[in-house]
Image (tube, rainbow, N blue to C red):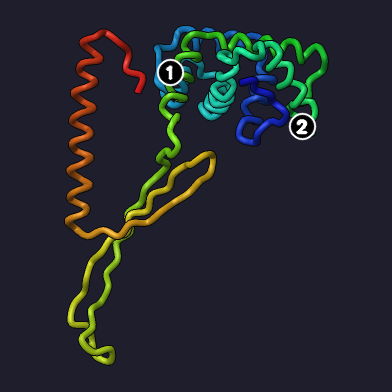
Amino acid sequence: MAITITTIPGPYRSGFASIKKLSPDTFELLVSALENAPLAGGLKKLTAAVVQQLPVLKQQEIRDILRTVFSLSAFTTDEDTTLSENLANLTTAMQTSGEPDLKLSDQERAAFEKRLEKLLTIKTVAISSKAQRLRLEYPVTFHDAMILTDMRPVFDKPEERPVGCEISHTLQITYHEHGDHKEFFVALDDDDLETIKKAIQRAEAKASSVKSLIKLANLPDLS
């Protein structure tokens, strides 16, 4: 299915602006750092690897750039439209965005498209972005969790002091579903906390076992 870019989403604008303003020397240093970075299973690990090699850029700037490049990585597998066509659509969307930081002259536009194409074809970037896409290819993905603990008084008679207290917990799960940020709540008691703790410990033990097999197979762990 063809992918057409008509607008620049807000979360990626700072990344495009950073790529645009990099000096030629700094851009080549970024390319070199990415080419020499170890295979990483996503944005966070690849950012950390590049930061160590490229102190001239701030961590947040590197993260913004890589997040933006990761968002474009699907274009390299789009069989209906060539990468150059997609990048041309992208720079047109930048021109019409109304954002001064995204404006490009004709000369800048050609150079900018070449920069993006170069970043997208770096093996480390391609594999890391693919690993991250695979990790998120579920209808629902976890975002965060919090457990709220309450103490509720128990009354025999409303007008008298409580005869005791009951401790309960509420598990709040926030998640992403089809691009939307959602949440739900589940009441827990101490037994439920123990059940969750044991389930996490079992999952950690299984992950450790699988990682040992990956290591024996001499494959990078991209999880």
Which residue is the site of mark 1?
49
Q: Quadrant for residue 45, please give it.
A: top left
**Crowding at mark 1 (Cα within 10 Å: few <14, some 14-19, many 20+):** some
Q: Quadrant for residue 44, please give it.
A: top left
Q: Quadrant for residue 218, please give it.
A: top left
Mark nearer the N terminus (1 vs 2): 1
Tag 1 secondary structure: helix
Any part of residue 58 in sight: no
- Residue at figure coordinates x 42%, y 20% from the top left: 131
Which residue is the site of mark 2?
97
Residue 73 is tagged as none
In the image, is 91 to the left or to the right of 174? Answer: right
**Where in the figure is residue 185, as x and y percent of width and height?**
37, 56
**Where in the figure is residue 146, as x and y percent of width and height?**
35, 51
**Crowding at mark 2 (Cα within 10 Å: few <14, some 14-19, many 20+):** some
Foreground residue, 23 or 185? Answer: 185
Tag 2 secondary structure: loop
- Residue at figure coordinates x 62%, y 30% from the top left: 12
Foreground residue, 132 or 32? Answer: 132
- Residue at figure coordinates x 48%, y 49% from the top left: 182
